[in-house]
Image (cartoon, grey):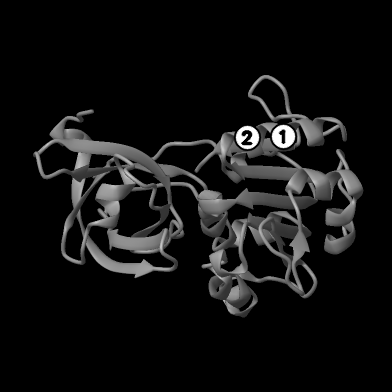
Amino acid sequence: MTARDDKFTRQTITALQRHTPKLFSLRCTRDAAFRFRAGQFARLGVRTASGCVVWRAYSMVSAPHDDYLEFFSIQVPDGQFSSQLARLQVGDELLVERQAYGFLTLDRFSDGRDLWLLASGTGIAPFLSILQEPEVWQRFAQVRLLYSVRHAEEQVYRALLDALPGRDYLGIRAGQWQYLVTLTGEQQDGCLHGRLTRLLATGELERAAGLALQPEHSRLMVCGNPQMIEDTRESLRQRGLQLALTRRPGQVAVENYW
């Protein structure tokens, strides 16, 4: 896949962090003209040994006000893009298209009292960006993040999430925010256990969050693999929570990311 030179900028890798054998994060410089809304994604390009460029979309972990871009990835064995991305070192080039894309932003909702962010795997990336912006804390009385991973060690952004209330510029009020984790591959104290759809069906998620899912008050953003998205959408539909569309307001916004 190719892109015209005027459609992208050449950025430089400034930091790399390997969290687990498969999960890693990277930071790169940011072109001064690159603008995005929290929750959007960029198309990244990596040049292969043969000289061709492969492209893939990645949501920004970093906030719109940061002077760098950060991305979160899983290395897929023999993956055309992730394998190339994982080989990059500090100082290497990363191509970034000039335009940001995506509609998993707070613009999807014109109202609502409670915001639920439901993520699996690397699908947490857009929510990390959203949570680092004051807008979400100003608009919603309650904010809940549920992160579904197989093993506890995959909560690689736990420190960032735990530190959010200490960022004075966000204005987070006492009792406004809660971070919940569900583990699907093991059990551990302090974490929920099982798939998101089970937690929704049994009411366990709402009990743990101390908050009810109600169509009139709840707004949900869901990001993860396609099967997780499909199953969660159906579970929410059964609760009267509908997909928000341009032609029809709703309570749910989704994006595939894996």
Within 10 Å of the Cα at label 1, are there few (<14), some (14-19), or many (20+) other Cα atoms?
Answer: few
Q: Nearer the viewer, residue 139 or 186?
A: 186
Does residue 210 show up? Answer: no
Relative height, residue 111 to residue 155 (above, below): above
Left or right of 5 in this view: 162:
right
The disc labelled 2 sits on which kind of residue? Gln
Within 10 Å of the Cα at label 2, are there few (<14), some (14-19), or many (20+) other Cα atoms?
Answer: few
Which image quarter: residue 92? bottom left
Label count reads 2
Classify mark 2: helix, strand or loop. helix
Task: Name the residue furthest top.
Answer: 247
Does residue 40 show up? Answer: yes
Percent from the top left, x then y, of residue 70?
38, 59
Percent from the top left, x then y, of residue 69?
35, 58
Percent from the top left, x then y, of residue 98?
28, 41
Left or right of 22 in this view: 182:
right
Percent from the top left, x then y, of residue 177?
73, 67
* Quarter the N terminus occupies: top left
Which image quarter: residue 136? bottom right
Give the residue drawn at x 36%, y 69%: 17
Determine the CA span between mark 1 and mark 2: 6 Å
The disc labelled 1 sits on which kind of residue? Asp
The label shown at residue 103 is none
Task: Name the residue furthest bottom.
Answer: 166
Classify mark 1: helix, strand or loop. helix
Give the residue drawn at x 62%, y 75%: 162
The label shown at residue 231 is 1
Give the residue drawn at x 71%, y 29%: 243
Left or right of 92 in this view: 159:
right
Give yes or no for contact between labels 1 and 2 (Cβ–Cβ under 8 Å): yes
The label shown at residue 227 is 2
Left or right of 225 in this view: 89:
left
